[in-house]
Image (cartoon, rainbow, N blue to C red):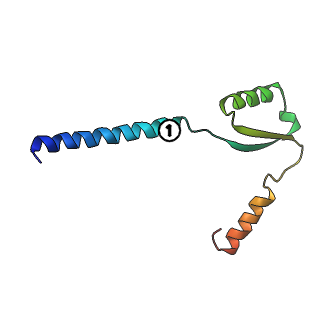
Amino acid sequence: MTEAAQSHYVTCCRLLEELDEANRQIALEHEVNGGKLRLVVHPMLVSGTFSRLLRRYRAIAPHVSLVVSVQDHATNLFDGLIRRCERSLCRAGLA
């Protein structure tokens, strides 16, 4: 391969790498956040401000399911599935 051909090949490889990186960045920007977010709020914190915050959050994260509970006592937010998983990890020596 001639020197000019090698230089052209190196330039093409660099451009392809830059294109791949640009595509990765675009994909990351359009990644959708989703899932369930459980909130437990003390009654003293429930107000018009809290409602506005929830509306704003829903506007920027429409694929997140919000589950809001109002309680005046401490709450365990872990469900049985997580506890079973933690026990499995402990038995396996991973936690």
User: In the displayed image of the protein, which residue is found farthest to the front?
Assistant: 1
Where residue 84 appears, as percent x and y from the top left, is 76, 65
User: In the displayed image of the protein, which residue is found farthest to the left?
Assistant: 2
Left or right of residue 60, residue 25 in this image: left
Q: Secondary structure at mark 1?
A: helix
Q: Which residue occupies 79% across, 30% down?
A: 50
**Residue situated in front as seen by the camera: 6 or 86:** 6
Task: Please tell me whether residue 73 is drawn above or below residue 11 in the rendered image.
Answer: below
Where residue 67 appears, as percent x and y from the top left, is 80, 41
Left or right of residue 25, residue 34 in this image: right
**Residue situated in front as seen by the camera: 79 or 32:** 32
Q: Which residue occupies 75% across, 31% down?
A: 54
Residue type marked 1: Ala
Left or right of residue 68, residue 27 in this image: left
Task: Please tell me whether residue 1 is drawn above or below residue 52 in the rendered image.
Answer: below
Identify the residue under disc 1. Answer: 27
Where residue 11 appears, as percent x and y from the top left, is 23, 39
Give neighbour class at mark 1: few <14, some 14-19, many 20+ (Cα, 10 Å). Answer: few
